[in-house]
Image (cartoon, rainbow, N blue to C red):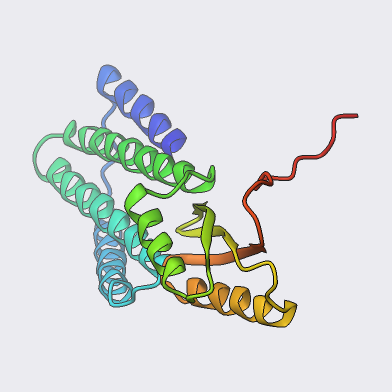
Amino acid sequence: MATLGLHILFESGRQLLAKTQPERDPMKERWMIGIMISVTVVKFVRMLYCRRFENEIVRAYAQDHFFDVITNAIGLVTAVLAIKFYWWLDPTGAIIIALYTISNWSRTVMENVWSLIGRTAPQEYLAKLTYLIWNHDKEIKHIDTVRAYTFGCNYFVEADIVLPEEMPLGQANNIGESLQEKIEQLPQVERAFVHVDFETTHKPEHKPKAS
């Protein structure tokens, strides 16, 4: 979209410099106005509908529809003004749309890049996870590590807990599994992984041996 915005920006600038005036055809102008008004109204209604949902994907559709409403409205207004008054208003409107497109989609790209590279969660969120884990079961003697990193709009969570060495395997498995299910019930958690151990002298990460 940003590349398309650059193309529109260059083409509109060329038209302004060359003073290229569009061909006037009343019939085509009426069709253009009718189509753009219809599309803008449909996009606006769909935007309002999608904003009713909490799902991030549906809200992304709402953002896309809002973008179309803004660009269509600017294009329609400048096109009508260019027909009625000054021809240069049409390429000027296209330049405004191009700058808005580049700015909007570049910002969207940067937001999604941070979500996709596995950035760690804020300290406040890690503290919330630590508190939940510590109060999950009285048999938990120590919390070795708590990690959360972005996976799209949500988080992957990793937790290492320490249980008594003499605890039966079945009881330890039940504690770890129920903790995993509790963490995954949090609204921002995509998946949780709970590792159960009986001591803290080991390294929490297991790296492959160098060949």
Q: Position of residue 169 (x, y in %)?
A: 74, 77
Q: Position of residue 22 (x, y in %)?
A: 29, 36
Q: Is residue 78 left or right of residue 134?
A: left
Which sits in the foreground, 170 or 209? 170
Q: Is residue 76 left or right of residue 154?
A: left
Q: Position of residue 171 (x, y in %)?
A: 66, 81
Which sits in the foreground, 110 or 161? 161
| Above/below status of 16 relative to 107 | above
Q: Residue furthest top?
A: 17
- For the C terminus, give its image quadrant: top right
Q: Residue furthest right?
A: 211
Q: Residue furthest left?
A: 85
The number of numbered badges drawn on the structure is 0
Splitting the image into 4 quarters, where does residue 177 fall?
bottom right
Which sits in the foreground, 39 or 32? 39
Splitting the image into 4 quarters, where does residue 2 fall?
top left
Q: Is residue 28 left or right of residue 138?
A: left
Which residue is painted at 61% across and 65% down in the image? 194
Q: Position of residue 45 (x, y in %)?
A: 26, 74
Splitting the image into 4 quarters, where does residue 53 fall?
bottom left
| Above/below status of 36 relative to 168 | above
Which residue is painted at 25% across and 23% down in the image? 16
Which sits in the foreground, 56 or 42? 56
- For the N terminus, give its image quadrant: top left
